[in-house]
């Protein structure tokens, strides 16, 4: 039974990551949009926790405006302001979960003796 539950969870997590790649990384690659890891780091520096990062990004993407953006003007000039997304709130929050899962700095920290 535990194997079945783990398999189902794995399928759902792979699907969520796949959605993130097709719905977000399709534009956020080298030249089409700002690098997603750097965006994450900027939001993390300003907001301090993954929970607050998700909430701040969610609020921005629900109503993207230059004056609400954390991006520097040269980045906005290069890529423009983020377009309004057609995702419902539940889908957007699920995509943020995948985003944090992929870029979370805690997973990149290595402590050596």
Image: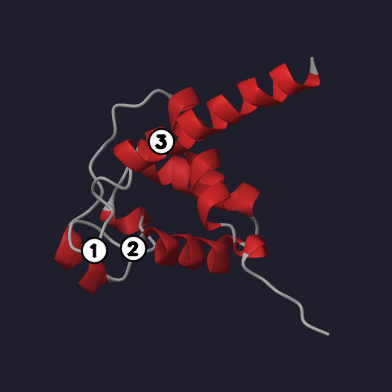
Marks 3 and 2: which is nearer the front?
Answer: 3
Q: Distance between the residues labelled 3 and 2?
A: 18 Å
Asked whether the beta carbons under mark 2 and mark 1 sit within 8 Å of each other, the answer is yes
The answer to whether 62 is drawn above or below residue 75 in the figure is above
Along the viewing direction, whichever of 9 and 29 lies nearer the viewer: 9
Marks 3 and 1: which is nearer the front?
Answer: 3
On the image, the x and y values in percent for residue 46 come to: 54, 66
| Crowding at mark 1 (Cα within 10 Å: few <14, some 14-19, many 20+) | few
The residue drawn where x is 47% and y is 67% is 42
Number of on-image labels: 3
The quadrant where residue 33 appears: bottom left
On the image, the x and y values in percent for residue 17 come to: 46, 38
Can you tell which mark lies on residue 35? 2
**Element type where label 3 sits in the image:** helix
Mark 3 / mark 1, whichever is N-terminal: 3
Along the viewing direction, whichever of 102 and 58 lies nearer the viewer: 102
Along the viewing direction, whichever of 56 and 92 lies nearer the viewer: 92
Can you tell which mark lies on residue 30? 1
The answer to whether 34 appears left or right of 96 in the picture is left
The residue drawn where x is 18% and y is 63% is 31
Can you tell which mark lies on residue 74? none
On the image, the x and y values in percent for residue 30 come to: 23, 63
Q: How far apart are marks 2 and 1 (CA)?
A: 7 Å
The residue drawn where x is 54% and y is 46% is 54
Mark 2 / mark 1, whichever is N-terminal: 1
The answer to whether 73 appears left or right of 110 in the picture is left
Asked whether the beta carbons under mark 3 and mark 2 sit within 8 Å of each other, the answer is no
Q: Mark 3 points at which residue?
A: 18
The quadrant where residue 62 appears: top left
| Crowding at mark 2 (Cα within 10 Å: few <14, some 14-19, many 20+) | some
**Element type where label 2 sits in the image:** loop
The residue drawn where x is 51% and y is 41% is 98
């Amino acid at each position: 039974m535990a194997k079945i539950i783990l398999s189902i969870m794995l399928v759902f997590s792979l699907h969520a990551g796949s959605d993130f790649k097709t719905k977000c990384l399709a534009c956020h690659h080298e030249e089409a949009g700002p690098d997603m890891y750097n965006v994450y780091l900027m939001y993390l520096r300003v907001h301090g926790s993954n929970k607050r990062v998700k909430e701040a990004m969610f609020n921005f993407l629900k109503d993207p405006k230059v004056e609400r953006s954390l991006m520097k003007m040269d980045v906005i000039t290069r890529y423009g302001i983020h377009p309004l997304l057609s995702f419902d709130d539940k889908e957007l929050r699920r995509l943020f979960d995948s985003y944090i899962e992929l870029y979370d700095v805690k997973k990149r920290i290595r402590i050596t003796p």
